[in-house]
Every structure is written in C-alpha cells, then in structure tokens.
Amino acid sequence: MTTIDPWVREALRCPATGATLVDGTGPDGEPELHSTDAERPVAYPVRDGIPVLLADDARPL
C-alpha cells in the first residue's frame, strides 16, 4: 500500500462530495482511496504513489 503522510491524508477529500478518503484496495489489487460518503461512495486510483482525484477516473463502490 502506498504511504501518504498523515497531514496530506487529512487534507484530501472527495472532490465530488467533500467526504473523507480512506485507504482501500481495488479489484485488481492496486491501492486506491475510498470515499466515506454514505450516499455516493466512490474509489479513486493511486498511480505511482499519487492519488488521482478526478471524478472521471473514479469508480463507484
């Protein structure tokens, strides 16, 4: 799993809903960030250790 500094993790939010993001693993075993939004949970990929917080790259959970 990619390590993201705690201060960066605290600042990251889902761009669509503003929800907190937590570490997750995608269906392919790759790291991703999961939105904690109860109504619209999505997952954002982490590529080369960099979270890609683009709505077009998110997948529904």
Image (spheres, rainbow, N blue to C red):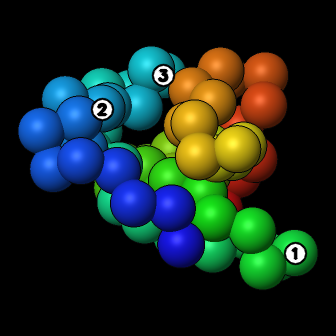
User: Is the residue 8 above or below the residue 2 in the image?
Assistant: above
- Please tell me which residue is depicted at 32% across the width and 31% down the height of the picture: 13
Residue that carries the numbered disc 3 in the rendered image: 16
Residue linked to disc 1: 28
Q: Position of residue 58 (x, y in %)?
A: 71, 38
Q: Nearer the viewer, residue 44 or 59?
A: 44
Between residue 15 and residue 1, name the one nearer to us: 1
Instruction: Give the spatial CA distance, label 3 vs label 2.
Output: 12 Å
First in residue order: circle 3 vs circle 1? 3
Picture quarter containing residue 20? top left
For the question of whether residue 38 can be seen, the reply is: no
Q: Quadrant of the C terminus?
A: bottom right
Task: For label 2, count other residues whose C-alpha is less than 10 Å away and answer few (under 14), some (14-19) or many (20+).
Answer: some
| Rendered residue at 78%/79% (across/down) | 29
Q: In this view, does 33 lie to the left or right of 60?
A: left
C-alpha separation, residue under disc 1 versus residue under disc 2 = 23 Å
Q: Where is residue 44 in the image (x, y as percent from the top left)?
A: 62, 44
Q: Nearer the viewer, mark 3 or mark 2?
A: 2
Name above or below for residue 34 compared with residue 8. Answer: below
Instruction: Mark 3 vs mark 1: give the one in front.
Output: 1
Residue 30 coordinates in the image, percent (x, y): 75, 68
Identify residue for label 2.
12
Circles 1 and 2 in contact, beta carbons < 8 Å:
no
Between the residue at mark 3 and the residue at mark 1, the CA separation in whole angstroms equals 24 Å
Residue 47 seen from this side: yes
